[in-house]
Image (spheres, rainbow, N blue to C red):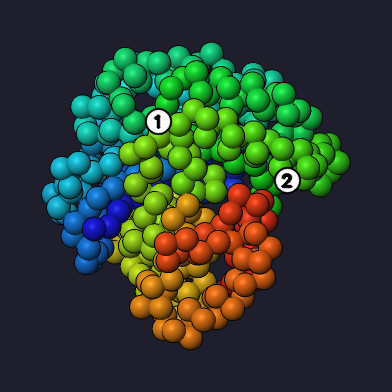
């Protein structure tokens, strides 16, 4: 089994924090869809059985339903897509009208990931989000009314000037919506973004590490009490509703990425499409390979296996680590883990090495110590 990711780079406007490739050239949607379909035709992807399909962005909900259907029809014509395949579309709440939602359902989209980010209108305006808190709530309710039973929302915390009580109100409001999945991220200052420039110019200040930690702790406790499984550092799901597509990344399952800026992985090498809609479309239409390739060394694959495994509640399967990379790598991992095991940041449970709650707060440092690179 494998997954397919389709990058839809179109946005009506740009958010100040986003570091993903996007464009406001909405007039090029039709030629972009044609290029994605041609890329599918030109790609010799050996994994014929598809378990997940994910439309990410950008803002995929800016794409007409008919265009999304065109891409799906090519995928279904070329691959064996599982009957119960998870088909996700990322969307902005103000795009989620009843008509649009019914259209998505009619073409097989069965999971929605909505970029809510906050239920505070002032913070949404600060981020340059297009929707209001009221629209976010209404979008979730309308998706339910149409029949969607697998809905995820994204939240952010650590805004300049945000208090712990502010964050509690956001989390508590999210829980009233009774969604199946929630992703929560600390506000990141990505180089090259408008947000990062504001920080560099002294116009805003980051929240303290202590406050950010308190926000994360409240998030974990509140979602645990509400019956969510904390299955990945930033992701929480009700039982049976983990994101299948994102889980494939953390489990090292191959995936094919289509579109400008998309990445692919076949288990040994990665390749990257250009972060330019013009370069991408021109290359595809001329039959030119515009991808950049990267073959991973065994040490690099070991590093990724350890890093992605530790991000999840399942941890690093030590038997599988030995099978893939040898007993020397297994011993290296355990030898470097001992300090963190003694310090209560890692634990070995049922043959897997996992982060403890204490370890989650310093996960980057722990992972770094176990890597070879």
Q: CA distance from mark 2 to mark 1?
A: 32 Å
Question: Above or below — where is 274 with respect to 59?
Answer: below
Q: Quadrant of residue 158?
A: top right
Q: Which element is circle 1 on?
A: loop
Residue at the spot 66% in from the left edge and 45% down from the top edge: 188
Q: Is residue 256 left or right of residue 217?
A: left
Quadrant holding the C terminus: bottom right
Say which mark, if any, is on residue 196.
2
Q: Nearer the viewer, residue 96 or 261?
A: 96
Give the residue furthest to the right: 202
Residue at the image position 56 percent from the left and 57 percent from the top: 355
Q: Position of residue 349 (x, y in %)?
A: 47, 61
Sequence-wise, the earlier of marks 2 and 1 is 1
The quarter in which the N terminus is drawn is: bottom left
Q: Looking at the image, which is closer to me, 325 or 5? A: 325
Dot 2, how many residues are within 10 Å of its Cα: few (below 14), some (14-19), or many (20+)?
Answer: some
Mark 2 secondary-structure assignment = helix
Check disc 1 and report the residue beneath it.
180
| Image vertical order of residue 184 relative to residue 244, above or below | above
Measuring from the top left, give residue 131's x and y in whole percent: 54, 21
């Amino acid at each position: 089994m494998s997954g397919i990711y389709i990058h839809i780079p179109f946005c009506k406007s740009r958010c100040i924090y986003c570091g993903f490739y996007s464009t406001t050239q909405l007039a090029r949607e039709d030629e972009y869809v044609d290029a994605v379909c041609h890329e599918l035709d030109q790609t010799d992807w050996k994994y014929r059985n598809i378990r997940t399909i994910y439309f990410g962005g950008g803002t995929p909900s800016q794409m007409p339903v008919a265009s999304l259907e065109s891409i799906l029809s090519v995928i279904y014509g070329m691959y064996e897509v599982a009957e119960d395949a998870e088909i996700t579309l990322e969307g902005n709440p103000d795009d989620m009208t009843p008509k649009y939602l019914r259209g998505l359902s009619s073409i097989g989209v069965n999971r929605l990931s909505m970029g809510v980010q906050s239920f505070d209108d002032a913070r949404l305006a600060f981020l340059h989000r297009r929707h209001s808190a009221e629209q976010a709530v209404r979008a979730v309710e309308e998706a339910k009314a149409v029949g969607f039973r697998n809905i995820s929302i994204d939240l952010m915390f650590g805004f300049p000037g945000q208090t712990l009580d502010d964050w509690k109100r956001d989390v508590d409001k999210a829980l009233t919506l009774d969604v199946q999945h929630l992703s929560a991220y600390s506000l990141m200052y990505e180089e090259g973004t408008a947000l990062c420039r504001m920080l560099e110019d002294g116009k805003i200040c980051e929240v303290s590490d202590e406050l950010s930690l308190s926000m994360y702790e409240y998030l974990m406790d509140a979602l645990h009490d509400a019956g969510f499984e904390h299955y990945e550092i930033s992701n929480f799901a009700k039982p049976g509703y983990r994101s299948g597509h994102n889980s494939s990344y953390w489990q090292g399952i191959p995936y094919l990425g289509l579109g400008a800026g998309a990445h692919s992985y076949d288990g040994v090498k990665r390749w990257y499409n250009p972060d330019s809609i013009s370069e991408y479309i021109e290359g595809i239409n001329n039959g030119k390979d515009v991808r950049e390739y990267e073959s991973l060394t065994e040490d690099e694959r070991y590093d990724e296996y350890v890093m992605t495994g530790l991000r999840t509640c399942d941890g690093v399967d030590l038997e599988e680590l030995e099978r893939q990379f040898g007993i020397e790598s297994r011993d290296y991992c355990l030898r470097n883990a001992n300090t963190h095991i003694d310090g209560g940041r890692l634990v070995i449970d049922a043959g897997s090495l996992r982060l403890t709650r204490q370890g989650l707060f310093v996960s980057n440092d722990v992972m770094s110590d176990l890597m070879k690179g």
